[in-house]
Amino acid sequence: MIAADYLKYIVNEIHRTIVATVDSEGLPVTCAIDMMDCDENSLYFLTAKGKAFYDRLITREFLALTAMKGEDTMSSVAVSVRGKVREIGFEKIPELFQKNPYMNEIYPTEESRKALTVFQIYEGSGEWFDLSKIPIERASFTFGKAETAKSGYFINDNCIGCGSCLDVCPQSCIDLSVTPAVIRQENCLHCGNCKYVCPVGAVEKR
């Protein structure tokens, strides 16, 4: 999947997310926010200008969110995003209400909707994590002008092919058929076991 597919999945398949922002004292605050629309490079949501959430968005211009779908842990898909936000105002409100008609029950009149404003998450990075598959499936993506940065555990040329890493890998996602061995990033839990047992320090955390 490409970034647009992950953003669309958040809006259409999950919709309700838990968003984290930072308050004036530098402490994290979470709240439940519906992601109401998307395009190829951004997500859209709304809030009331009288809320403390609005103040945090305006001050920090950044958020992180996690959206989860599944009946239990082992059937869950989680998509996390962190990125820059900006206020784009009232103009998109009618479109968001049309796409999310339940909002008419919360703000039933044109007058009451004047309290609302729309924000766009226009640049950021994200991670897809699917525990319903064996081995687990993970993927990273970026959108907007955010740069792709590799993260996780990687094996360097110091590897001697001893297999210690595979012995402790909960997903058995290390390929020992080559030296240096290769961690299949799309299946890695990022637990760090491989790094801690490697006798020659060949595993790097990035």
Image (cartoon, rainbow, N blue to C red):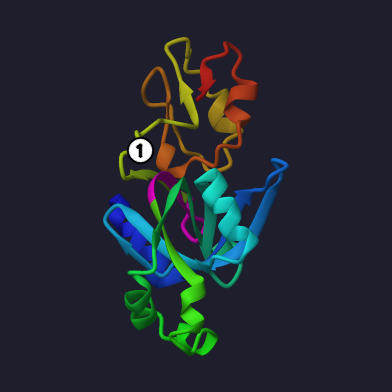
The mark tally for this picture is 1
Picture residue at 47% right of the left edge, 76% below the top:
114
The residue tagged 1 is 146
- Residue 129, percent from left and from top: 48, 52
Q: Nearer the viewer, residue 111 or 34?
A: 111
- Does 11 sit above or below residue 57? below
37 vs 43: above or below: below
Residue 134 part of the magenta segment: yes
Residue 191 lies in the magenta stretch: no
> Magenta segment, principal secondary structure?
strand
Relative to 98, say whether 154 is above or below: above
Q: Is residue 55 visible?
A: yes
Image x and y of residue 185, in percent:
42, 37
Q: Quadrant of the rendered structure where residue 179 is?
A: top left
Name the element at disc 1. loop
**What residue lies at 59% left-to-right and 23% top-to-bottom?**
195
Q: Which residue occupies 50% across, 25% down? A: 206
Is 59 in front, or is 100? 59
Question: Where in the figure is residue 162, as x and y percent of width and height?
Answer: 52, 18
Q: Looking at the image, which is closer to me, 153 or 178?
A: 153
Front position in the image: 23 or 20: 23
Q: Is residue 5 left or right of residue 189?
A: left
Q: Residues within 10 Å of mark 1 (few under 14, many from 20)?
A: some
Highlighted magenta segment, given as a residue range: 122-136
Q: Which amino acid type corresponds to the residue marked 1 in the rendered image?
A: Ala
Q: Is residue 1 visible?
A: no
Percent coordinates x, y for residue 17 in the rendering? 53, 64
Residue 82 sits above or below residue 165 on the image: below
